[in-house]
Structures are given as C-alpha cells and as structure tokens.
Amino acid sequence: MAPQLTSFVSTKDLDLELVQQLFLRAEKLKRLRGVLSSHEKALEGDTVANLFWESSTRTRTSFQLAAHRLGAYVVNLNASESSVAKGESLEDTIANLRALGCRFFVVRHSVSGKVEQLAQNAGRGTSIINAGDGTNEHPSQALLDAFTIRERKKNFDGLQMAIIGDVVRSRVAHSNMYLLSRLGVKIRFCGPKQLVPEKFDVPNASMLESVDEAVKDADIIMVLRMQREREGRILSLSDEEYRKHYGLNGKRMALAKPDAILMHPGPIIRGMEVESDVADGPQSVILRQAENGLFMRMAIFEALRGDRG
Ligand code: NCD
C-alpha cells in the first residue's frame, strides 16, 4: 500500500505506487468532469488557504477550483495584501490561519526550500502543498505533466523527451526530471550554456548543445520560459538570438517523431521560446496540461485528506 501523504513538497522521493494511484484517480475525476456528489467530496467543511507570494494564473486557479469541487472553503492571500507586508512572518500568518480552521496551505514562494521548511514545522493535521518554491520544485505541475504524457503515450518507459530553455531556474524542469526519470523517460536538456546545469543528479538525463539534436526523434518536447525575473544568471544572448538558437518553430518540431507532443507549463511567450503556429498546432498539448491540472490537484487534495478525522 502507498504511504499516507501528509504534505506535498517534492517529486524526488514521491512513492511511485502513490503516483500510479494519483494517475488513476485523476483519470476517474476527469471522466466525471470533476463533478462529485456531496458525500464524495473529501474536503467538505475543510478550509484551504492559497498563499501565493509570487504571481500565478494556472496554478492558483486550478488549486482553488479543485478545492471548491471537493467542497472546501478557499481563502486567497498574497504577500502585499496580507500582514506579511507589515512585517509578520509567514510562519505566524500560517499559525493564525490554522487558528481560523485552515488545514491545507497551498504555498508559492520565491525562496527555494521555504515550503519544505514550512512542511517540517507544520503541526499535526496540517498539510503544506508546494505550488512552486523559487527555482527548486513545482511538484503538482510535474504530476499533471506526467498525467498528460500518460494520456497520450500510455507508457513512460523508453520515451525520449527534450526539455529546452532556462533549465537551471525552472522548478518545473526540476520536478519533472525527478519524477519522469524514475518512470523511465530519457531526458535531453538543451539551452544556453548559462541556463543549463553542469551536471544532473538523476539517471537517464543528458545535455545536448544543439536544439535540432535534442528534438530529433523525440516523443515529447517541453519548452520553458526564460525566467528573467529571477536573478543569478546573466544571459549574453538577445531575444532575437535566443529565438534563432533555441526557439521552437515548425522546422524544428518536424525533426521530432511525427506523433510527438509539445508541452509548456505556461505562461508562454509567443515568438520567443515558441512560435504561435507550433504552440497552437495539432501536436500541442499545452491547454490540455492546464485542463488536467484541475483533476490532478483534486487527486492530490484527496490523497492528503486520506482518512484523517
Ligand atoms: C511556471 C512556474 O510558475 O513555475 N508556471 C506554472 O506554474 N504553470 C513556469 C513559469 O513561470 O515559467
């Protein structure tokens, strides 16, 4: 039996049996279009706090809708509107929201490792969910991405995946790499020298210098946004040079397998990392990723709820 999930911060050590259970549950929820009768709603009467200390469209909305579909009340806070702006610590904010009955905290934060630290100090009966911490991890995105791959490709083993762009600063790339490599996907990274790691601490991952080589015969292409808002790396390429060397266009897409899928966590910057005709083309599953986020996040909440009293 898969272990009971108490908080959800990383895909690194996520039990693979639990991952399979989440796939099956998300599949069922998708068939039901996320509509459950009241006795099936696992979070009925619970309160979820969405603490988004960085901007978000897809992640925040789908966690909010997922919690609603499961019967929870949802409160949304961001740093500038909360007492954090007056100097309160995030830990104190959470303690006060717990006093108000919040049991689930969906946290997005700019500091890598902050969410794990909150999870370690969370009291009994409190679940912390990582909605993206700095450049570290974004585990629910990796699960919905894996679910989307599974929907199209059925099996993971032996699939060739190209991940292109700002890899070092992408929490999406990290969580995907930890999960998908364990599921048997072979990952080739490609991006400007300053934006790709020097070494990988996972099996089945390699680095290629040319995008054409990285996408050749790939089953999956994942394109990443340049995280200009994050410090730490200076890129000497202009936008136009980036587009020329690393942008995904129709010609490059044609080098992949004919049934290859194109993924992107969003937001996409059209004409920079990906051309519109490819992003909106028949091989793109970008909006399907967004759609699947709702069902996967419902499944994650249910797993966290478990059979707690
Ligand atoms: C990403 C994020 O915030 O990490 N988006 C998302 O959650 N779907 C990727 C990005 O901002 O580029």
Image: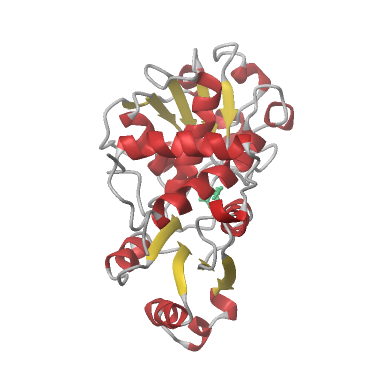
- Quarter occupied by residue 197: top left
Tell me if residue 105 comes above or below residue 236 in the rendering.
below
How many numbered marks does the figure carry? 0
Closer-to-camera residue (309/21): 309
Left or right: 223 in relation to 107: right
Model colouring? secondary structure
Position in image of residue 15 (x %, y %): 29, 40
Tell me if residue 253 comes above or below residue 240 in the rendering.
above
- Quarter occupied by residue 248: top right
Left or right: 93 in relation to 41: left
Position in image of residue 45 (x %, y %): 54, 68
Give the residue drawn at x 60%, y 11%. 258
- The answer, for residue 90, to whether it is visible in the render is yes
Position in image of residue 267 (x %, y %): 63, 47
Q: In which quarter of the image is the C terminus?
A: bottom left
- The answer, for residue 232, to whether it is visible in the render is no
Q: In which quarter of the image is the N terminus?
A: top left
Closer-to-camera residue (6/287): 6
Give the residue drawn at x 45%, y 66%. 105
Extreme-bottom residue of the structure? 86
Give the residue drawn at x 27%, y 65%. 120
Position in image of residue 288 (x %, y %): 63, 35
